[in-house]
Amino acid sequence: MPVGINQPSNQIRLTNVSLVRLKKGKKRFEIACYKNKVLEYRAGIETDLDNVLQIPSVFLNVSKGQTAPAADLAKAFGANTSTDDIVLEILKKGELQVGEKERHAQLERVHNEVIDIVAGKLVDPTSKRVYTAGMIAKALEQLSGHRREEGGGAGTPEEGVGKVKERPTWTGVVTTKSAKSQALDAMRALIAWQPIPVARARMRLRVSCPVGMLKQPAKVARGEGEEEGKGTVKERILSYVEEVESQGEVGGEWEVVGFVEPGAFKGLGEFVGGETKGRGRVEVLDMAVVHEDT
């Protein structure tokens, strides 16, 4: 007599699998992927679907090997939607199902990446020195645990207005958003609540402009036309610069090197480009200027 239980020939046994699940049209659909490949695909690191999908089929239940009937797929995704397009939609929009150990490891990776980004972008506004990753992590932990400690809410009254202006809050790292976007959220919350004194590290830029344009009245956009604004082109450029490192004329061009808040960079670039008709330039010398202890 044969020993053991034979596996049915039409059942596909999948190993080393990660599930991506999407609920649509009152049905839950799943695809079977290789572990770690889903995140690489979503990050643009892996582009070959053959290296991501264990099998190019849509399931109602992967663990039971139950494939989704064509009628269910047509009802949920549309009759003219191909299986390949359905798989891509689930892969891009579905929820990645991972084990507790994998989820913890993934959360820790994202957390460390967020802390590293924030620590490189914020400084002590007095000393201009960076904080350690540990200090940034502790400050964010304070925010997530006590985000409503001031006045019992997350807002402060606007000046002259009887309304409450919401301040950015921080509730902790998640795995469903990129580390970069979460780092921006964390920086906004740290700057708004100041659990430790922080400010954005400044950008170091070089701005150049033809000498002949420096004394021209600056123009500002007004609807479809332009009107003269306050000050000359040179004065307006310098108004964006918090601290001038050097300035002078070189070969018919005026150059200034200085420090600018990251939030002012876009406005400065647009102003220089518009006023000089493309003859002026804004060059980034350092993305985040900080002072580190040696």
Image: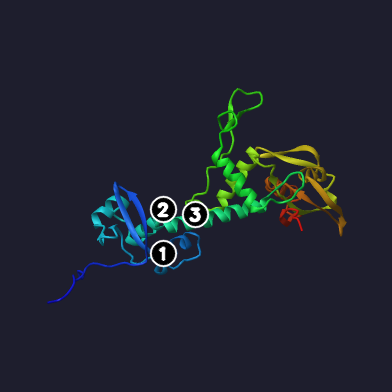
Number of the label disc, if any, that sits on residue 107: 3
Residue in the picture at 85% in, 45% down: 215
Residue 158, horizontal then vertical, whole percent: 63, 27
Residue furthest bottom as drawn:
1
Amino acid on which the number 3 mark rests in the picture: Leu
- Frontmost residue, 21 versus 189: 189
Instruction: Indicate the quadrant containing the C terminus: top left, top right, bottom left or bottom right.
Output: bottom right
Secondary structure, mark 2, is: helix
Q: Position of residue 79 (x, y in %)?
A: 28, 54
Q: Quadrant of residue 228?
A: top right
The amino acid at mark 1 is Lys
Q: Nearer the viewer, residue 275 or 183?
A: 183
With respect to residue 202, does 15 lie above or below?
below
Q: Where 31 falls versus 272 (above or below)?
A: below
Residue type pointed to by label 2: Lys
Q: Nearer the viewer, mark 2 or mark 3?
A: 3
